[in-house]
Image (cartoon, rainbow, N blue to C red):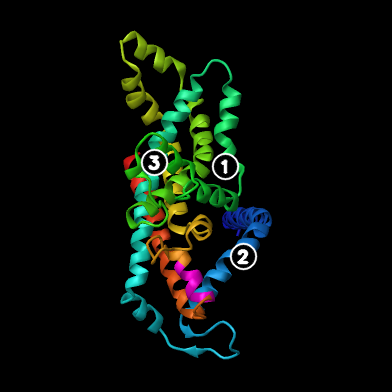
Amino acid sequence: MNMNLPTVNVSAQNQNIVRGQRNNKIKRFAVIASFLSPALILYGVFMLYPMADAVRYSLFDWNGASPTMNFVGIENYARLATDTLFFRALGNNLLWVVLSLTLMVIPTLVLAVLISKVKRGKTFFRAAFYLPSVLSLAVVGVLWSKIYDPTMGPINIFLRAVGFDFMARNWLGEQMFVIPALVIASTWAFYGLYMILFLAGLQSIEPQMYEAADIDGAGPIRKFWYITVPSLRNTMNVVISMVIIHALKGFALIWIMTQGGPFYMSEVVSTLVYKTAFSMNQVSYATAQSVVLGIIIIIFTIGFNYYRERTE
């Protein structure tokens, strides 16, 4: 019996150690849950629940006011697959993405680099270029509607004054120009925000890298392309993600300036969803459109972040 006593004590000690580790894990989980639970509850109530409810609505036939809803399954999605207007709106969204990336990412980066090299008045230039970002999109939409006015707009007045009357046109009324005109207004409204992000990223680049490049005789373009751009890869990834998401779900500026017109030339999915829900009283079908748009945005975001992590 005396020979078995140490074995019993060792076993009891192991059980106490395991029990203690389990209690520590429970305490650690309780602490983490206590910090995360407010955010998780808010996210669940205001994000996850509405998203799940939207999917549920898309499976019914409902006008938004009737007390009864008829279950139709995937009929709304089958109708969406043959809706040429939806695909036109989606095509306008993709065109908006391409133009936004072209006009925002590199031009805004170049502007941030130029401002970072200004010796005097740097704060003034930062505030001046950031000013459009503090304006509401309603103000931006009204302002640029006046700028694009075919009769009294300053663009056409300037073109006629310098003898280029043939270039003066209805910028928001012609198919070839309405989307680029809207994208330029959107770029003006948001480039200050992206410029601030690039300026913050530029401050993290070691000056010794530029000094070594100067010793090697590198010019401004080579330093920009081989030092600045690679060093700001993470910032560019954030900016590109924000530009794509904004371009896919943009609504306010288009609604204020054109409401998707003329003749659906500037229609995007978000404006089409609004018209379908509140003008045609087809809430369930509009919900199906918004669900598809949300899935596309999620796929874009996950795909881009996966590509970014693979290339880092």
Comparing marks 2 and 3, which lies closer to the viewer? 3
State which quadrant residue 4 falls in.
Answer: bottom right
Q: Residue 199's spot in the image, x, y percent?
A: 51, 30
Q: Residue 259's spot in the image, x, y percent?
A: 48, 63
**SS state under label 3:** helix
Q: Which residue is mark 3?
A: 103
Query: Type of residue at label 1?
Result: Ser
Mark 2 or mark 3: name the one nearer the start of the chain. Answer: 2
- Cα–Cα span, label 3 and label 1: 16 Å
Q: Residue 136's spot in the image, x, y percent?
A: 61, 49
Front-most of 23 and 245?
245
Q: Residue 82's spot in the image, x, y percent?
A: 31, 77
Query: Which span of residues is magenta-colored?
Result: 272-278
Q: Is residue 277 magenta-colored?
A: yes
Q: Which residue is mark 2?
A: 46
* Residue drawn where x is 35% and y is 36% of the image: 163
